[in-house]
Amino acid sequence: MLDAKQTKKPSLPIKMRIRKGDTVQVINGKEKGKTGEVLKTMPIENRVVVQGVNLRTRHMKPSQEGESGRIVTEEASLHASNVMFYSTKKKVASRIEVFIDKDGSKKRRLKKTGELID
């Protein structure tokens, strides 16, 4: 039996269609409707960190003498299922499909508009 602090994590990374640098919109939770750029992806936990979304404040103690403590605001992660790719050109959120181009390379495109991402 697992304790409250111990959680079982999957050992293999999950294939994510969202990548670092993509613009996404939050579709569920208290931050619903906000958009931002993906700063970091965590494929093992299936989570993403989005700029300016899900902010948390931490109170830091001073590390040296003479230094004062500070309050740090940083982004916490969101589950990847709670975000959706957001097209800045068409101003619409859409799912992503991966397809193989005529030359044999994999590309990403939006399901709603057919717009190529890569």
Image: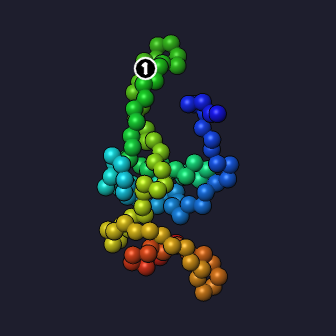
Q: Is residue 59 left or right of residue 47?
A: left
User: Residue 17 in the image: x percent, y percent?
Assistant: 53, 64
Examine the rendered structure and indicate whether residue 4 appears above or below residue 32. Answer: above
Residue sitting at x 37%, y 66%: 93
Q: Label 1: state its secondary structure.
A: loop
56 or 46: which is nearer to us? 46
Q: Quadrant of the N terminus?
A: top right
Residue sitting at x 32%, y 68%: 91
71 or 104: which is nearer to us? 104
Q: Is residue 8 left or right of residue 114?
A: right
Three-letter code, disc 1: Gly
Residue sitting at x 59%, y 53%: 43
Circle 1 residue: 69
Which residue appears farthest toward the bottom when viewing the image?
102
Residue sitting at x 46%, y 56%: 81
Q: Is residue 114 visible?
A: yes
